Amino acid sequence: MRGLFDDPRPRQGLVSVPRGNGKSTLAAALGLYGLLGDGVEGAQVLCVASDERQARIVFNAARRMVELSPALADRVQVFQDRLYVPGTDSVMAPLPAEPGALQGFDPSLCVVDELHVVGEHVWEAMSLASGKRDRSLVLAISTPAADSESVMWKLVAHGREGTDPSFYLKEFAAPVGCDPADEEAWEQANPALDDFLHRDALRATLRTSWESSFRRFRLGQWAGAEDAWLPDGAWDSCADRSVRLEDGAQVCLGFDGSFSGDTTALVVASVAGVPHIDVVAVWERRSIRTPGKSRSSRSRTPSGRRAPGGRSARSPATRSAGAGRCSCSRRRGCRSWSSRSRRRA
Protein backbone atom coordinates (compact mmCIF):
# COMPACT_ATOMS: atom_id res chain seq x y z
CA MET A 1 0.00 0.00 0.00
CA ARG A 2 3.02 2.31 0.27
CA GLY A 3 2.80 3.05 -3.43
CA LEU A 4 -0.65 4.56 -2.91
CA PHE A 5 0.26 7.08 -0.22
CA ASP A 6 3.94 7.84 -0.77
CA ASP A 7 5.03 10.94 -2.63
CA PRO A 8 4.55 11.57 -5.44
CA ARG A 9 1.03 10.27 -4.84
CA PRO A 10 -0.91 8.75 -7.75
CA ARG A 11 -4.34 10.10 -8.62
CA GLN A 12 -5.86 6.70 -9.38
CA GLY A 13 -5.13 3.19 -8.17
CA LEU A 14 -6.29 -0.39 -8.56
CA VAL A 15 -5.55 -3.34 -6.27
CA SER A 16 -6.55 -6.70 -7.79
CA VAL A 17 -6.69 -9.54 -5.27
CA PRO A 18 -8.55 -12.88 -5.10
CA ARG A 19 -11.65 -13.42 -3.03
CA GLY A 20 -11.29 -14.13 0.67
CA ASN A 21 -8.28 -11.91 1.31
CA GLY A 22 -10.08 -9.18 3.22
CA LYS A 23 -10.76 -6.65 0.45
CA SER A 24 -13.63 -4.95 2.26
CA THR A 25 -11.68 -4.83 5.52
CA LEU A 26 -8.69 -3.35 3.70
CA ALA A 27 -10.98 -0.77 2.07
CA ALA A 28 -12.35 0.15 5.51
CA ALA A 29 -8.87 0.56 7.00
CA LEU A 30 -7.71 2.72 4.09
CA GLY A 31 -10.88 4.79 4.43
CA LEU A 32 -10.12 5.46 8.10
CA TYR A 33 -6.57 6.42 7.20
CA GLY A 34 -7.95 8.92 4.71
CA LEU A 35 -10.32 10.22 7.36
CA LEU A 36 -7.86 10.52 10.25
CA GLY A 37 -4.25 9.94 9.27
CA ASP A 38 -3.72 11.67 5.97
CA GLY A 39 -3.54 15.20 7.36
CA VAL A 40 -6.43 16.49 5.24
CA GLU A 41 -8.64 19.30 6.57
CA GLY A 42 -12.29 18.73 5.67
CA ALA A 43 -11.60 15.28 4.19
CA GLN A 44 -14.39 13.56 2.27
CA VAL A 45 -13.91 9.79 2.16
CA LEU A 46 -16.43 7.92 0.02
CA CYS A 47 -16.96 4.15 0.12
CA VAL A 48 -18.56 3.22 -3.20
CA ALA A 49 -19.85 -0.24 -4.15
CA SER A 50 -22.27 -1.85 -6.58
CA ASP A 51 -25.21 -1.22 -4.25
CA GLU A 52 -25.89 0.33 -0.86
CA ARG A 53 -25.73 -3.04 0.91
CA GLN A 54 -22.19 -3.71 -0.34
CA ALA A 55 -21.12 -0.14 0.38
CA ARG A 56 -22.35 -0.51 3.95
CA ILE A 57 -20.23 -3.65 4.42
CA VAL A 58 -17.14 -1.47 4.04
CA PHE A 59 -18.66 1.33 6.11
CA ASN A 60 -19.76 -1.01 8.92
CA ALA A 61 -16.27 -2.52 9.10
CA ALA A 62 -14.83 0.98 9.52
CA ARG A 63 -17.48 1.86 12.10
CA ARG A 64 -16.68 -1.25 14.13
CA MET A 65 -12.96 -0.44 14.04
CA VAL A 66 -13.78 2.95 15.55
CA GLU A 67 -16.04 1.45 18.23
CA LEU A 68 -13.38 -1.06 19.28
CA SER A 69 -10.60 1.50 19.59
CA PRO A 70 -10.83 3.98 22.48
CA ALA A 71 -8.34 6.29 20.73
CA LEU A 72 -10.47 6.41 17.58
CA ALA A 73 -13.75 6.58 19.48
CA ASP A 74 -12.56 9.74 21.24
CA ARG A 75 -12.03 11.50 17.88
CA VAL A 76 -14.83 10.13 15.69
CA GLN A 77 -18.57 10.60 16.01
CA VAL A 78 -20.53 7.61 14.68
CA PHE A 79 -23.82 8.18 12.87
CA GLN A 80 -26.00 5.72 10.97
CA ASP A 81 -24.93 7.03 7.57
CA ARG A 82 -21.51 8.57 8.22
CA LEU A 83 -18.45 8.88 10.43
CA TYR A 84 -17.64 12.46 11.39
CA VAL A 85 -14.46 13.99 12.82
CA PRO A 86 -15.29 17.39 14.43
CA GLY A 87 -11.65 18.35 14.84
CA THR A 88 -11.08 18.52 11.08
CA ASP A 89 -14.69 18.64 9.81
CA SER A 90 -14.02 15.39 7.93
CA VAL A 91 -16.59 12.78 6.94
CA MET A 92 -16.67 9.17 5.71
CA ALA A 93 -19.84 7.86 4.07
CA PRO A 94 -21.09 4.84 2.05
CA LEU A 95 -22.60 5.41 -1.39
CA PRO A 96 -24.15 3.08 -4.01
CA ALA A 97 -22.60 2.99 -7.47
CA GLU A 98 -25.15 5.31 -9.07
CA PRO A 99 -23.90 8.40 -10.93
CA GLY A 100 -26.70 10.52 -9.49
CA ALA A 101 -25.72 9.63 -5.93
CA LEU A 102 -22.08 10.54 -6.62
CA GLN A 103 -22.68 14.12 -7.73
CA GLY A 104 -21.81 17.13 -5.60
CA PHE A 105 -18.89 15.59 -3.71
CA ASP A 106 -15.27 16.72 -3.53
CA PRO A 107 -13.62 13.51 -2.32
CA SER A 108 -10.14 13.46 -0.90
CA LEU A 109 -10.28 9.64 -1.06
CA CYS A 110 -12.78 7.47 -2.90
CA VAL A 111 -12.57 3.70 -2.37
CA VAL A 112 -14.48 1.61 -4.93
CA ASP A 113 -15.17 -1.91 -3.65
CA GLU A 114 -15.48 -4.76 -6.19
CA LEU A 115 -14.87 -2.79 -9.36
CA HIS A 116 -15.63 -5.88 -11.46
CA VAL A 117 -19.37 -5.36 -10.88
CA VAL A 118 -19.26 -1.57 -11.23
CA GLY A 119 -19.83 0.07 -14.60
CA GLU A 120 -17.51 2.37 -16.48
CA HIS A 121 -19.84 5.31 -15.91
CA VAL A 122 -19.37 5.04 -12.13
CA TRP A 123 -15.58 4.98 -12.35
CA GLU A 124 -15.75 7.95 -14.68
CA ALA A 125 -18.10 9.86 -12.37
CA MET A 126 -15.73 9.44 -9.43
CA SER A 127 -12.66 10.28 -11.49
CA LEU A 128 -14.27 13.47 -12.73
CA ALA A 129 -15.42 14.43 -9.23
CA SER A 130 -11.90 14.21 -7.83
CA GLY A 131 -8.91 16.36 -8.70
CA LYS A 132 -9.86 19.58 -6.91
CA ARG A 133 -7.57 18.64 -4.02
CA ASP A 134 -3.81 18.45 -4.31
CA ARG A 135 -3.65 14.86 -2.99
CA SER A 136 -6.98 13.28 -3.94
CA LEU A 137 -7.05 9.57 -4.79
CA VAL A 138 -9.62 7.29 -6.47
CA LEU A 139 -8.83 3.69 -5.51
CA ALA A 140 -10.51 0.44 -6.58
CA ILE A 141 -10.06 -2.87 -4.75
CA SER A 142 -11.49 -5.86 -6.59
CA THR A 143 -11.41 -9.46 -7.73
CA PRO A 144 -10.69 -9.77 -11.49
CA ALA A 145 -13.70 -9.28 -13.74
CA ALA A 146 -15.25 -12.08 -15.79
CA ASP A 147 -14.30 -10.67 -19.19
CA SER A 148 -12.09 -8.21 -20.99
CA GLU A 149 -14.94 -5.86 -21.88
CA SER A 150 -15.04 -4.48 -18.33
CA VAL A 151 -13.63 -1.17 -17.16
CA MET A 152 -11.46 -3.11 -14.72
CA TRP A 153 -9.62 -4.92 -17.51
CA LYS A 154 -9.02 -1.65 -19.34
CA LEU A 155 -7.50 -0.19 -16.17
CA VAL A 156 -5.36 -3.30 -15.61
CA ALA A 157 -4.06 -3.09 -19.16
CA HIS A 158 -3.32 0.60 -18.67
CA GLY A 159 -1.48 -0.07 -15.42
CA ARG A 160 0.58 -2.88 -16.91
CA GLU A 161 1.96 -0.50 -19.50
CA GLY A 162 3.81 1.23 -16.68
CA THR A 163 3.91 4.58 -18.47
CA ASP A 164 1.52 6.61 -16.28
CA PRO A 165 3.00 7.69 -12.92
CA SER A 166 -0.41 9.00 -11.84
CA PHE A 167 -1.86 5.46 -11.95
CA TYR A 168 -0.93 2.75 -9.41
CA LEU A 169 -1.56 -0.95 -10.07
CA LYS A 170 -0.96 -3.83 -7.67
CA GLU A 171 -1.95 -7.35 -8.72
CA PHE A 172 -1.97 -10.41 -6.49
CA ALA A 173 -2.14 -13.33 -8.90
CA ALA A 174 -0.72 -16.79 -9.52
CA PRO A 175 1.70 -17.22 -12.45
CA VAL A 176 0.05 -17.49 -15.86
CA GLY A 177 -0.39 -21.10 -16.94
CA CYS A 178 0.24 -22.57 -13.49
CA ASP A 179 -1.45 -25.77 -12.36
CA PRO A 180 -4.53 -24.68 -10.36
CA ALA A 181 -3.58 -27.29 -7.74
CA ASP A 182 -0.10 -25.79 -7.24
CA GLU A 183 -0.18 -24.59 -3.64
CA GLU A 184 2.93 -22.48 -4.10
CA ALA A 185 0.93 -20.52 -6.68
CA TRP A 186 -1.84 -20.16 -4.09
CA GLU A 187 0.64 -18.53 -1.74
CA GLN A 188 1.72 -16.05 -4.40
CA ALA A 189 -1.88 -15.03 -5.15
CA ASN A 190 -3.35 -14.98 -1.65
CA PRO A 191 -1.65 -12.77 0.95
CA ALA A 192 -4.08 -14.02 3.63
CA LEU A 193 -3.41 -17.73 3.02
CA ASP A 194 -2.75 -19.63 6.27
CA ASP A 195 -3.84 -16.55 8.21
CA PHE A 196 -7.61 -16.08 7.94
CA LEU A 197 -7.87 -17.80 4.52
CA HIS A 198 -7.63 -21.52 5.13
CA ARG A 199 -5.71 -23.84 2.83
CA ASP A 200 -8.05 -26.81 3.32
CA ALA A 201 -10.97 -24.62 2.20
CA LEU A 202 -9.19 -23.89 -1.09
CA ARG A 203 -8.52 -27.60 -1.59
CA ALA A 204 -12.22 -28.35 -1.13
CA THR A 205 -13.20 -25.50 -3.46
CA LEU A 206 -10.84 -26.71 -6.18
CA ARG A 207 -12.50 -30.14 -6.23
CA THR A 208 -16.00 -28.74 -6.74
CA SER A 209 -15.48 -25.62 -8.92
CA TRP A 210 -14.98 -24.88 -12.59
CA GLU A 211 -11.30 -24.39 -13.28
CA SER A 212 -11.93 -20.95 -14.81
CA SER A 213 -13.87 -19.85 -11.71
CA PHE A 214 -11.14 -21.11 -9.39
CA ARG A 215 -8.50 -19.28 -11.40
CA ARG A 216 -10.44 -16.04 -11.28
CA PHE A 217 -11.71 -16.02 -7.69
CA ARG A 218 -8.90 -17.91 -5.93
CA LEU A 219 -5.83 -17.33 -8.11
CA GLY A 220 -6.55 -13.76 -9.23
CA GLN A 221 -6.19 -14.66 -12.90
CA TRP A 222 -8.12 -13.35 -15.87
CA ALA A 223 -9.57 -16.70 -16.86
CA GLY A 224 -12.34 -15.74 -19.31
CA ALA A 225 -15.90 -17.01 -19.26
CA GLU A 226 -16.87 -18.91 -16.15
CA ASP A 227 -18.68 -21.58 -18.18
CA ALA A 228 -15.62 -22.44 -20.26
CA TRP A 229 -16.08 -25.91 -21.75
CA LEU A 230 -12.38 -26.65 -22.32
CA PRO A 231 -9.43 -26.60 -19.92
CA ASP A 232 -7.00 -23.71 -20.21
CA GLY A 233 -4.72 -24.18 -23.24
CA ALA A 234 -6.71 -27.05 -24.80
CA TRP A 235 -8.04 -24.97 -27.69
CA ASP A 236 -4.66 -23.48 -28.60
CA SER A 237 -3.18 -26.97 -28.76
CA CYS A 238 -5.62 -27.85 -31.58
CA ALA A 239 -4.32 -25.18 -33.95
CA ASP A 240 -3.15 -26.43 -37.38
CA ARG A 241 -2.15 -23.56 -39.65
CA SER A 242 -1.40 -25.92 -42.54
CA VAL A 243 -5.12 -26.64 -43.16
CA ARG A 244 -7.00 -24.49 -45.68
CA LEU A 245 -10.64 -24.57 -46.71
CA GLU A 246 -10.80 -25.18 -50.44
CA ASP A 247 -13.31 -23.68 -52.91
CA GLY A 248 -16.54 -25.66 -52.96
CA ALA A 249 -16.00 -27.25 -49.57
CA GLN A 250 -19.10 -28.13 -47.55
CA VAL A 251 -19.12 -25.92 -44.47
CA CYS A 252 -21.31 -24.63 -41.66
CA LEU A 253 -21.47 -21.03 -40.53
CA GLY A 254 -21.73 -19.98 -36.91
CA PHE A 255 -22.83 -16.44 -35.99
CA ASP A 256 -22.62 -14.93 -32.52
CA GLY A 257 -24.40 -11.58 -32.53
CA SER A 258 -24.26 -9.01 -29.76
CA PHE A 259 -26.99 -6.70 -28.52
CA SER A 260 -24.99 -5.21 -25.64
CA GLY A 261 -22.06 -3.52 -27.34
CA ASP A 262 -19.45 -6.27 -27.11
CA THR A 263 -17.99 -8.54 -29.82
CA THR A 264 -19.87 -10.06 -32.77
CA ALA A 265 -18.26 -12.95 -34.67
CA LEU A 266 -18.85 -15.02 -37.83
CA VAL A 267 -16.98 -18.35 -38.03
CA VAL A 268 -16.87 -21.22 -40.52
CA ALA A 269 -16.42 -24.96 -39.91
CA SER A 270 -15.71 -27.64 -42.50
CA VAL A 271 -17.95 -30.71 -42.71
CA ALA A 272 -15.42 -33.48 -42.22
CA GLY A 273 -14.44 -36.28 -39.91
CA VAL A 274 -12.11 -33.82 -38.19
CA PRO A 275 -13.70 -30.39 -38.76
CA HIS A 276 -11.54 -27.32 -39.25
CA ILE A 277 -12.82 -24.07 -37.77
CA ASP A 278 -11.78 -20.61 -38.92
CA VAL A 279 -12.85 -17.00 -38.48
CA VAL A 280 -14.59 -15.13 -41.30
CA ALA A 281 -14.85 -11.77 -39.53
CA VAL A 282 -15.04 -10.22 -36.08
CA TRP A 283 -16.70 -6.93 -35.21
CA GLU A 284 -15.19 -5.65 -31.97
CA ARG A 285 -16.19 -2.85 -29.66
CA ARG A 286 -13.60 -0.12 -29.74
CA SER A 287 -11.62 0.53 -26.56
CA ILE A 288 -13.44 2.33 -23.77
CA ARG A 289 -11.93 5.34 -22.12
CA THR A 290 -8.87 4.76 -19.97
CA PRO A 291 -6.61 7.49 -18.63
CA GLY A 292 -5.21 9.42 -21.57
CA LYS A 293 -7.34 7.58 -24.15
CA SER A 294 -10.54 8.34 -25.99
CA ARG A 295 -14.08 7.21 -25.20
CA SER A 296 -15.39 4.07 -26.75
CA SER A 297 -17.70 3.86 -29.70
CA ARG A 298 -20.29 1.13 -29.92
CA SER A 299 -20.00 0.89 -33.68
CA ARG A 300 -18.34 -2.24 -34.95
CA THR A 301 -15.94 -2.77 -37.83
CA PRO A 302 -14.56 -6.05 -39.17
CA SER A 303 -11.26 -6.73 -37.48
CA GLY A 304 -10.26 -10.00 -39.16
CA ARG A 305 -6.99 -9.75 -41.10
CA ARG A 306 -7.13 -11.75 -44.34
CA ALA A 307 -4.44 -14.23 -45.20
CA PRO A 308 -3.79 -15.65 -48.71
CA GLY A 309 -6.73 -17.70 -49.91
CA GLY A 310 -9.28 -15.60 -48.09
CA ARG A 311 -8.67 -17.13 -44.66
CA SER A 312 -8.87 -14.91 -41.65
CA ALA A 313 -5.51 -14.66 -39.90
CA ARG A 314 -6.70 -14.66 -36.33
CA SER A 315 -5.18 -16.30 -33.28
CA PRO A 316 -6.58 -19.63 -32.01
CA ALA A 317 -7.85 -17.80 -28.93
CA THR A 318 -9.93 -15.53 -31.17
CA ARG A 319 -11.24 -18.49 -33.14
CA SER A 320 -12.60 -20.01 -29.98
CA ALA A 321 -15.22 -17.25 -29.74
CA GLY A 322 -17.62 -19.08 -32.07
CA ALA A 323 -16.33 -22.62 -32.00
CA GLY A 324 -19.00 -23.95 -29.69
CA ARG A 325 -21.77 -22.59 -31.91
CA CYS A 326 -20.96 -24.45 -35.17
CA SER A 327 -23.41 -27.28 -35.88
CA CYS A 328 -23.10 -30.15 -38.34
CA SER A 329 -24.27 -29.87 -41.96
CA ARG A 330 -27.38 -31.94 -41.37
CA ARG A 331 -28.93 -29.41 -39.02
CA ARG A 332 -31.20 -26.59 -40.07
CA GLY A 333 -29.30 -23.53 -41.17
CA CYS A 334 -26.24 -25.33 -42.59
CA ARG A 335 -25.49 -24.86 -46.26
CA SER A 336 -22.82 -25.27 -48.93
CA TRP A 337 -20.58 -22.28 -48.99
CA SER A 338 -17.48 -21.78 -51.12
CA SER A 339 -14.28 -19.95 -50.32
CA ARG A 340 -15.10 -17.61 -53.18
CA SER A 341 -18.40 -16.53 -51.60
CA ARG A 342 -16.62 -16.33 -48.23
CA ARG A 343 -14.20 -13.79 -49.72
CA ARG A 344 -17.15 -11.72 -50.86
CA ALA A 345 -18.54 -11.82 -47.28
Image (cartoon, helix red, strand yellow):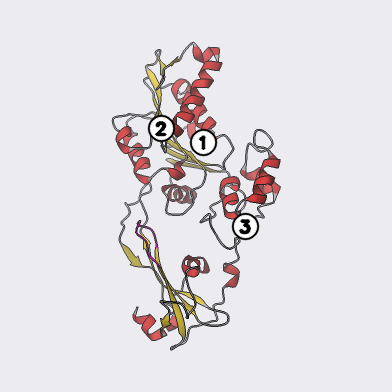
The crowding category of the residue bearing disc 3, from other C-alpha atoms within 10 Å (few below 14, some 14 to 19, many at least 20), is few
User: What residue do we see at 56% from left, 62% from top?
Assistant: 229
Question: Number of marks in the image?
Answer: 3
Q: Are marks 3 and 1 in contact (CB under 8 Å)?
A: no
Residue 177's disc number: 3
Q: Position of residue 122 (x, y in %)?
A: 36, 41
Residue 3's disc number: 1
Q: From what the image shows, is residue 285 above or below residue 26?
A: below
Question: 210 or 332, which lies in front?
Answer: 332
Sequence-first tag of 1 and 2: 1
Q: Position of residue 290 (x, y in %)?
A: 38, 48
Give the CA distance from mark 3 to mark 1. 28 Å
Residue 240 horizontal side relative to residue 185, left or right: left
Of the residues tagged 1 and 2, which is closer to the observer?
2
| Magenta segment boundaries in residue numbering | 256-263
User: What residue do we see at 38% from left, 68% from top?
Assistant: 303
Q: Quadrant of residue 264?
A: bottom left
Three-letter amino acid code of the residue under disc 1: Gly
For disc 2, the marked residue is 52
Three-letter amino acid code of the residue under disc 2: Glu
Kind of element beneath mark 3 = loop
- Whether residue 191 appears in magenta in the rendering, the answer is no
